[in-house]
Image (cartoon, grey):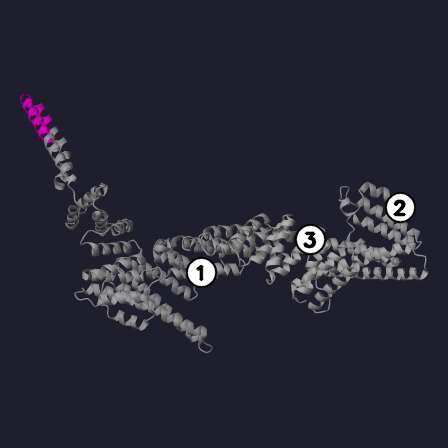
Amino acid sequence: MSNRRDADPIESNSEPGRFEQLRQWALEHRRASVAALAGTLVLIAGATASALYFRSSADTTEQQVTLQMALDALDREQYGEARKLAEELRKRRNLPPESLGGPPFVLGAAMIAEADVSWAAEQTHSYLLASRLLEEARDRGFPPGRHATGLFLLGKSLFKSQQFARSRRWLRESLAEDDSRAKQVNVLLSNAYVNDSNPKWGPALEHNSQYLSMRMLTPEERNEALLQRSRILFGLQQFDACRETLSQIAPDAKSRAEGTLMRARLLMHEAEQASTAADGSQTSGGDANATAKEKYAEAIHALRAAQGQDTLGSQTTRKSLYLIGVCYANMSDDVAALDQLQRTRRLYPVEPEGKAANLLEAELHRKAGHHDKAVMSYKLALESAGDPLVYSNPWVSLDDFRRRVEDAYDTYLADEQFEHANALLDDFSPIFSEDRTVQLQAQTQSRWGEAILAKADKLSPTQAEQAEIEARQHFIKAGYTYSELARLHTTGREYPEDVWRGAESFLAGHDFPNAKQLLTIYLKNESRQRRPQALLAFGQASMALGEIDEGITALRECIEFHPRDVAVYAARIWCAKAHQEKGELLEAEELLQENLVGSGLTPASPEWRESLFELGQLLHADGRYKQAIEKLTEAVEREKLLAGGQQFPYERPVVLGLYTIAEAYSLSAREPRQRLLTSTIESDRQETRRQITGALEQAANYYAIVRSLINRRQETAPLAEWDQAILRNSYFSLGSALFDLGRYNEAIEAYSDAEARYQNDPLVLEIFVQVANCYRRMDRTVEARGALERAKVVLKRLPAEGAYLESTNYTRDEWTDLLDRLSKW
């Protein structure tokens, strides 16, 4: 039936010629045309009847198609017929259960047979389709008597579609069930282990040995097996055995070029050994280096010879091109190496050698400091590596590939070249898993932010502010990336850790709403690990959002339910700040005192020292100046001792503590002044004056210390906004304290220092007024008026739209009026 159908198109194609001949004959023999026409009609009628008969016959035959018919056609190697029959069987819905695996088996087997003789470009896809059909057949059950064959064909199709690891199971099972294909199976298994993403040399050698032990191998089959054995032994680092195996290959073998290439690889190994000896030698390093270069030169010569022997232009040529590049790279001839590797990549972009050349080229660019080129080559290497499930490269195993790329990433990260590290990560998938890629992306953003913050202290205030903004942006990106990682791990044990990292990053980025959201999730999902730290962070985020009561609730839970956790000390400090924010100073003081007295903390711990500073500030805010001075003096003196005892360290708590001490002394003089106004007993008045003088002298002393400390800081680093504010206040407060002490010349000197610093600020007008007051107290009217006249000159010089109310209590017009009035006194 099939032969008849195949002939039909040929017969129909000949019909136009026949009808043309009849037409010409009819024109020439008109009398006979009627008879000819009648004869033609008879022929057409007969042909139509025949076609109807055969169509009916075919329909009947299709209705009777059986699995055995398809298997028979497959056995006769009539693959087209077998496929047609199998497709017809797949359409049926009434196949018995034991026959369900038959149609996909026939289709897969036929597809493999046809792929074996098709063009190479089409083979991989055909084998892949065949493997899927045969997996379906295995799941549904191979036809009776075809189980071993099905396993073999499944293993072969997986192997041919480069799914080497998956192929091995079915090949081994087919061999255990039926050893009639032992020759083919051992070859496939040996290659499947060699071509694995991470080669398994031991099992490969075992199957290679089984193959070589078989009888009836042809000389060429034996030579090919010996060549494969030499590769395996090289992979096992059994180099002497590798040389011995190569010596057994016939000189006239077709694989002679590959044998030469393997000998070149042995020379490269000898060169590597010599180079290693040079690196570790203190006496013969020069000789060893010379030996290494000589061996590499021999290897290059052998590789070029292998190219000459590769008359068919097979794999040997591309292998040798790549290996010559490796030789030049190991000889530190990077220019020659790059030229050779780029040539290999251009000629063989999709072959293993071209892909390996990409990776080595990237490493050479990175070594030379050409990082943009290096990143581009790494990205090409990652892109060309493809799916890790079918990764196979004899020059770079999958594990080695990942290690080398991660080494580049780690180096860029360690060198704080975050742009390059981040660019690499864009192409990590699919060769790296998605969760690994996302994890590294989050890590990069977090480290990036940390690096920017670490440098911010050495920048100007404006630059530092911009740096902090940039750093927070990276922390926020890290927070979102950790959130994405958490979604990937929703059902995994990593989930709480990812959520925690995300919350930490959002906190560092000052994205408090997102931080609080993740902390809520963390507290719901993690009942023990880091719960105290999470409650502390939740409290901090709540306070930053102005949700003070909610913050206190979380911090109190941390304090009361986790009293032995180290987070409780910081929780007390933050809870004290929250209570102080609400004006609940007693509650705040109790919490700080607990850290200082009842917690077991020592003065060496940061939390104890911070608690002491906080308590001093709280007492000052509550008007208990004497106690505030006592606590803050202890705090700053301890910091001075920790810094070496020579001078106060420039740290914000210390500067603020010193300034607060000065303020506390200054404010503590107010109450005695009020007593002085009402006291009539001279002895009491004298004691009161002594107290006032002592307090003001101490205030002046501490204002001078703060001024000196901040000025010294300005010599090495720009001042932050809070530094500038404290410095300005210290200048004026020092002058005021000296004025109140009646030390007018010293006060004028202090104000003059401030004048030099703030000469372009409306604040300088206040300074001239204070200087004029000092001169008036000394009855030096001329000098007083001179100071006010200078103030008028400066006022004219100052911009009309200056920020007068930000620095002083008056507008520009009000200053004009005030200076005119003061000048008339």
What kind of element bears circle 3?
Answer: helix
Q: What's the magenta bit mostly, secondary-structure-wise?
A: helix
Asked if the residues shown at circle 3 and circle 2 are in contact, with their CB atoms under 8 angstroms apart, the answer is: no
Q: Which residue is mark 3?
A: 579
Pointer 2: what residue?
822
User: Would you say 271 lies left or right of 668 here?
Assistant: left
Task: Name the residue tied to disc 1.
Answer: 363
> Which is more toward the observer, 752 or 158?
158
Looking at the rendering, the stretch of residues picked out in magenta corresponds to 20-47
Mark 1 or 2, nearer chain start: 1
Provide the secondary structure element on which disc 1 rests. helix
Marks 3/2: CA–CA distance: 47 Å
| Viewer-side label of 3, 2 | 3
Mark 1 or mark 2: which is in front?
A: 2
Mark 3 to mark 1 CA distance (whole Å): 58 Å
Q: In x, y percent, where is residue 39? A: 6, 26
> Going by the image, does 344 lie left or right of 52?
right
* Neighbour tally class for label 2: few under 14, some 14-19, many 20 plus, Cα within 10 Å: some
Asked if the residues shown at circle 1 and circle 2 are in contact, with their CB atoms under 8 angstroms apart, the answer is no
User: Where is residue 244, by image quadrant?
Assistant: bottom left
Q: Does 653 appear in magenta?
A: no
With 796 as the anchor, is 497 left or right in this view?
left
Q: Position of residue 223 (x, y in %)?
A: 23, 65
Which residue is at 83% across, 43% downward?
815
